[in-house]
Image (cartoon, helix red, strand yellow):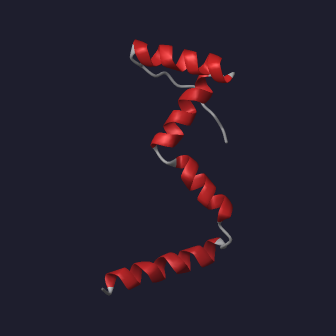
Amino acid sequence: MERRKTTLYLDEDLIKAVKIASAREGKREYQIVEAALRAYFGRDLLDELWRRNRLGEDEALTLAYSELEAERGK
């Protein structure tokens, strides 16, 4: 995954918390912020579900559309 540099404006207390977590966990500050954002947006869960996925793209689309049609028919 490509990472790009960005600027964020955060409350001083959040910056301190990130620095403390970074030192405590032995990780870089960006890793702490990225993990928090991934958790907030549920990306870790989505990534885990994709890893478990056994369907090909065509099969997944077929299943999704059949489920959509079934819901619309209710």
In the rendered picture of this protein, how many numbered marks are placed on residues?
Answer: 0
Q: Is residue 28 left or right of residue 12?
A: right
Can residue 55 be seen in the rendering of this structure?
yes
Q: Is residue 53 left or right of residue 74?
A: right
Give me the residue at 61% from left, 76% from top. 58
Residue 26 position by quadrant: top right
- Residue visible at 61% across and 78% down in the picture: 59
Q: Is residue 59 left or right of residue 37?
A: right
Give the residue at x 30% y 86%.
Answer: 74
Quarter holding the N terminus is top right
Relative image position of residue 24 (x, y in whole percent): 63, 19
State whether residue 27 appears in this view: no
In this view, 55 is above or below 37: below
Furthest toward the left, the residue is 74
Given the current orientation, which residue lies at the most extreme front position?
24
Viewer-closest of 56 and 44: 44
- Residue 6 appears at what percent x and percent y? 52, 25
Q: Nearer the viewer, residue 24 or 55?
A: 24
State the image coordinates of residue 8 (x, y, percent, origin top left). 46, 22
Question: In the picture, residue 27 is in which quadrant?
Answer: top right
Residue 13 at x, y percent in the picture: 42, 15
The residue that appears at 33% across and 82% down in the rendered structure is 72
